[in-house]
Structure formats: structure tokens, C-alpha cells
């Protein structure tokens, strides 16, 4: 299939899904006498997928409108900035759910739809001991290994992160392995954790519980430190800089999130030196994603629930997948039309199912700051990890 045919098929599918949602959305319609406006506090979205869903809702429900308030935040200040924002619905990064829950800023509720969430995704947001969720996943995310293919006739084994890291000679891998401040710290933390897990998958378990063994951390991060110090990989600050390095330097591999795949693939297929871009799994990827939660002080909880059902149900998941988002539930992954248009979809599912979450703790932001500080100095200034590293991350997660 040519690149034009591939993207024409994806665009056609997105149109079909949009029309299908509009024709089958009677269950979401409100018949209200008075008009209300619900405010959704969220970060930005360059794909257009989220905005399309909200536009669809607003057309279907003229008396129950959604207004988007974009709040640009980082791991360190999302709780503070969102808490200062008057909203009915919060679109939270998964790692912030415990903080909002502990502070009484969100309320659990029955998701009320038929979506079968992937197990790691559900664990991030479920109220313990019940079927209720603190927030309903809007999209999931997981670290992936991008690979530039120059000749599709060559049969190549799926590369591993460990083998890529050991490749001698010229630079071949770009990742978010440097940081210049709070806006890039979190990508750096995720990358470092993934490299540690590639060497020792017991260093972080499926519930986000970390090892506190200093020797274990030193062994797990030593290969990465050697590669950084020997300049065997590009250490970029943030996802955008990573993509630019991958494209500018014609690198073979890149660690990034799946939502970037459509834009990267489309741009690279136009280059004469690239046949296609393929997505592969990391040994263990770090789980991310965003989830929609109801503000505890919202005066329109019932309406907020209906909005969240619409934005997160299976039809919405299928539509978002065509914009690059990783679906949260099984039904989108097994859809035959989606699989035909998005050949990499199964690889994303397997990566999510084999992923690990970061520590799900109300003070995660403090942990992230300390972890980034210690590991950056270790990787880039050759300052050895000491017992102080262990003490700091233990204190943050106490």
C-alpha cells in the first residue's frame, strides 16, 4: 500500500467513524429546559481529535455545552494550576489521580459504558474494592521504539532496547534523556525508568512499587550511563527535540510516544532514504495517558458523567485512534477496520499490556523532581548514585 493510499484510508475511516458517532449518539442527548455550560480543564492537544469530539458533543447538545480551558502545566505544577481553575471536568495525567483523590478534589463514579479497559489502564484509576473509577481514561500512552526502515525487502529481527544501546559506531538512537526544566523532567524520568527496566524488570513492579536497592539501581543504569558518556545516543530534552534529532540526523531509532507516530510516519515516508517507520515494543514501557475526572465541587455532576461517557466510550476511542491516540479498551484494538488502517495498533496494545506505571502516590511530583535530579547528575556529570538517592526517593514516597 502506498503512503497516499494508507493515509487516504485513515482519513476515510475517521470520517466514517465521525458520521457513525453522530448517528448513534441519541443516548447522550440531553433534553433540558435551561442551558448550562461545563468547563473542561485540560492541557493542549495538537492532533485535533479531542476538539472534534467536543465539537460533536456541542452540536448534539445545544443546551449542555462544553467549554475547554487549556491549562499548560508540568508534573510539578499541574495540581496547583488545575486546583486554581474553576472546572467541572479535569483531564488529568494519570500520575496526578492520587493527588487529586487525596485532596478531595475529585469524586469516584460508575463509568456507565461498555468499554473493556486494558488491565494496566484500569489499575491506574479504579477505586479500591469497587467497580467505580476516580477518572475514566481518555487515552493511554506507553513508551515505544521507532525504527526507520530503508529497505522493506530485508527481513530484520525486532530490535531490543538493550541491543540498540550496545550498537557500536555512529549515533543511532534518540531519546528524552536530558532535561532543561520542569517541562522536560517527566519525559526524562520515563526514559530513565524504561532503560532501567530493560536491564532489570524487577526494579519497578506492575503496581508502580520501586526497588530501594542501591546496587540494583547502579547495575540497571550503568549501561545507559556508559552510552551517554560515550555519546552513543542523542540525549534530547523533551519529545519535540527528540523527533527533530531523529529526522534531522536520519537516525535509525527513536524512543517516543505513539501519539507522535502519524506525523512522524507521514513526514518520513516522503523522504527518499526512508521506506517506512515501524513501531516496536520496549522491553517494558512506562504507562502514561490522560483521564477525565469529575470535580468534587461541580454543580452538574450528572451532566459531567454523561459528557465523560461520550468522550471515552468505544466509538470515541476508535475515532481518537485515527488521530494517533492509544486506545484504552480492547474493542478498539480488535476492530478490523482500525487494524487495516493502523497496522501498528496491535503492537501498541501489547506494549500497554506489558507496561509498568510510575509510583502512584500523592507526592509523585516530589519523587519525580528528586529522581530526575539524581539521575541527570549521574548520567551527564558522572556523579555516582549514593545512598542519598535511595533516601530521597523513599522520603518522597513515604
Image (spheres, grey):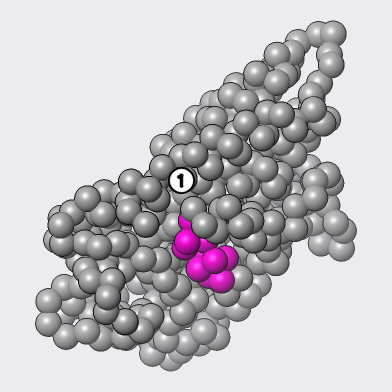
List x then y, in percent, for residue 276.
29, 62
Which of 11/213 is in front? Answer: 11
Is residue 295 placed above or below 189 in the rendered structure?
above
Q: How many marks?
A: 1
Classify residue 30 by image quadrant.
Answer: top right
Q: Is residue 248 left or right of residue 155?
A: left
Residue appearing at x 83%, y 52% in the figure: 132
Q: Is residue 346 magenta?
A: yes
User: Does residue 274 show up?
Assistant: yes
Q: Is residue 139 magenta?
A: no
List x then y, in percent, for residue 313.
71, 44
**Residue bounds of the magenta highlight:** 342-351
Look at mark 1 in the image and give the residue it sits on.
9
Helix, strand or loop for the magenta stretch, by majority: helix
Residue appearing at x 53%, y 30% in the figure: 51
* Quadrant holding the N terminus: bottom left
Which of 314/308 is in front? Answer: 314
Classify residue 92 by image quadrant.
Answer: top right
Residue appearing at x 69%, y 47% in the figure: 314
Which of 111/91 is in front? Answer: 111
User: Does residue 234 show up?
Assistant: no
Amino acid at each position: 500500500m502506498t503512503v497516499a493510499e494508507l493515509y487516504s484510508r485513515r482519513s476515510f475511516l475517521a470520517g466514517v467513524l465521525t458520521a457513525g458517532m453522530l448517528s448513534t449518539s441519541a443516548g447522550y442527548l440531553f433534553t433540558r429546559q435551561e442551558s448550562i455550560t461545563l468547563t473542561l480543564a485540560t492541557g493542549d492537544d495538537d492532533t485535533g481529535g479531542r476538539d472534534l469530539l467536543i465539537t460533536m458533543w456541542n452540536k448534539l447538545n445545544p443546551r449542555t455545552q462544553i467549554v475547554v480551558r487549556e491549562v499548560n502545566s508540568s508534573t510539578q505544577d499541574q495540581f496547583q494550576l488545575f486546583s486554581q481553575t474553576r472546572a467541572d471536568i479535569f483531564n488529568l495525567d494519570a500520575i496526578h489521580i492520587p493527588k487529586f483523590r487525596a485532596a478531595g478534589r475529585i469524586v469516584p463514579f460508575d463509568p456507565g459504558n461498555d468499554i473493556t479497559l486494558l488491565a494496566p489502564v484500569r489499575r491506574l484509576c479504579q477505586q479500591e474494592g469497587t467497580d467505580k473509577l476516580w477518572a475514566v481514561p481518555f487515552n493511554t500512552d506507553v513508551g515505544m521504539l521507532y525504527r526507520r526502515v530503508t529497505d522493506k525487502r530485508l527481513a530484520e529481527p525486532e530490535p531490543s532496547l538493550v541491543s540498540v544501546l550496545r550498537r557500536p559506531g555512529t549515533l543511532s538512537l534518540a531519546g528524552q534523556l536530558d532535561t532543561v526544566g520542569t517541562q522536560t523532567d517527566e519525559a526524562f524520568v520515563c526514559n530513565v525508568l524504561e532503560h532501567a527496566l530493560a536491564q532489570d524488570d524487577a526494579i519497578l513492579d506492575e503496581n508502580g512499587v520501586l526497588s530501594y536497592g542501591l546496587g540494583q539501581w547502579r547495575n540497571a543504569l550503568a549501561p545507559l550511563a556508559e552510552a551517554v558518556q560515550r555519546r552513543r545516543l542523542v540525549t534530547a530534552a523533551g519529545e519535540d527535540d527528540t523527533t527533530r534529532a531523529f529526522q534531522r540526523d536520519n537516525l535509525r531509532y527513536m524512543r517516543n510516544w505513539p501519539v507522535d507516530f502519524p506525523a512522524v510516519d507521514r513526514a518520513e515516508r516522503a523522504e527518499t532514504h526512508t521506506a517506512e517507520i515501524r513501531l516496536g515494543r520496549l522491553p517494558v514501557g512506562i504507562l502514561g495517558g490522560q483521564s477525565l475526572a469529575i470535580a468534587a465541587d461541580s454543580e452538574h455532576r450528572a451532566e459531567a458523567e454523561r459528557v465523560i461517557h461520550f468522550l471515552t466510550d468505544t466509538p470515541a476511542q476508535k475515532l481518537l485512534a485515527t488521530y494517533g491516540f492509544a486506545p484504552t479498551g480492547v474493542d478498539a484494538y480488535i476492530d478490523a477496520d482500525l487494524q487495516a488502517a493502523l497496522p501498528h495498533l496491535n503492537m501498541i496494545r501489547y506494549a500497554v499490556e506489558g507496561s509498568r506505571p510510575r509510583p502512584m502516590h500523592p507526592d509523585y511530583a516530589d519523587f519525580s523532581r528528586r529522581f530526575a535530579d539524581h539521575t541527570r547528575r549521574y548520567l551527564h556529570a558522572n556523579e555516582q548514585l549514593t545512598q542519598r538517592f535511595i533516601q530521597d526517593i523513599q522520603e518522597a514516597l513515604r
